Image (spheres, helix red, strand yellow):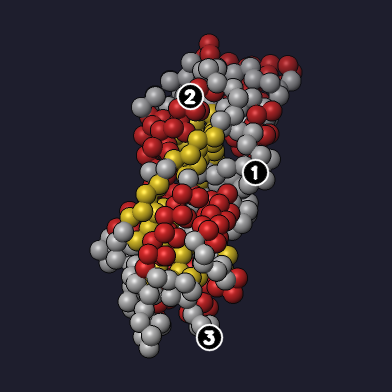
Amino acid sequence: MGRKVTSFDVARLASVSQPTVSRALRNLPGTSPETRARVLSAAQVLAYIPSDAGRNLSAQRTKRIAVVSEELTNPYYPELVEPLRYQLASRDYRTVLVTDTPAGPVGLEALADGSYDGVVLTTTGRTSTLPRDLTERGVPHVLVNRLLDEPESAAVGIDNAQGAALITELLVMLGHERIGSIQGPVETSTARERSAGLARSMRDSGLRVRRELTRRVPFSHHEGRSAALDLIGTAQPPTAIVCGNDVVAMGVLSAARSMGLRVPEDLTVIGFDDIRMAAWPLINLTTVHCDLELMAKEAVELLMQQIDGSRSEPTVQRIPVALRLRGTHGPLPAPGSSA
């Protein structure tokens, strides 16, 4: 049996790129008549048959959805991508994972070449122009766990302000006043909303927001640990540290252990997201629970409404949160303790 002919073979014979073959065979905009004729001729010569049996040619559907994610070394993203994949599969769509790289985020051309029926964006910055570019290209899309400063695309996000208020309420009840905060990059809506919500709820509760005890770092264990070592090493260290996500909180736990501090007797640590690792007995992290299954379900529903044409105007939905009380929170340490 001979080797199966692929779209790359057609591209090579027609002297074009593979995405151009994809667009030409679907008669999508952006391909000149001359180029399309060359691609069709090459496909006929090679007896090329498109391999996606699920494609509805009359509707120009690929039955594929691109999910843009960070690299999966961050444990949050597998836990977000999997419920998205499940929801899409239940609607007979295949998930194609497209990851940002250290060199930069995924660009428009990788998402708008006709390879996908829609796009799920999970890493978009607050001021990104990518959603607007996708709108202008007519590509259905939805933001998940990220919001734009100007809500011009469909989006589903967590109620970060509610989560911050729940954290503050707990810290007030425990008697903490010298509260540290290690938050994520301000260009992301999650980090901005969580830090702003925490500051607002603390002020409303009569607590002082101490700039010297506030740090902004990338969402990583290493950065969380470094920031915590810095805070713990100050002349008057915090008795509680609120973290922008669970991965940062785990870095704080590592820092506390290396400094000989007991959690929660000497230091309270609170995370945000409630990834599965947070509930492991070794970690047992007190954190804000975010319902990723519900977020994925709502996001895919918004995307499907765009694909079938039943919704075009942008809408923003918020998923409520809850506080998971585990083993890393405790009352204000007594005077003379090691904190």
For label 1, count other residues whose C-alpha is less than 10 Å away and answer few (under 14), some (14-19) or many (20+).
few
**SS for tag 3?**
loop
Q: Dot 1 lies on which element?
A: loop
**Distance between the alpha carbons at the discs numbered 1 and 2:** 24 Å
Residue occupied by mark 2: 304
Residue 67 placement (x, y as % from top left): 50, 38
At a point 51% along the width and 77% down the height, the residue shown is 231
**Disc 2 from disc 3: Cα separation:** 55 Å
What's the residue type where badge 2 is placed? Met
| Residue under label 1 | 149
Measuring 55% from the left and 57% from the top, which residue is drawn there? 200
**Residue 141 higher or lower than 223, as above or below:** above
Kindly give the residue lying farthest to the left in the view shown.
281
Q: Residue at x 38, y 43 (%)?
A: 291
User: Horizontally, is 214 left or right of 318 in the view?
Assistant: right
What residue sits right under mark 3 in the picture? Answer: 235
State how many labels appear.
3
Q: Quadrant of the C terminus?
A: bottom left
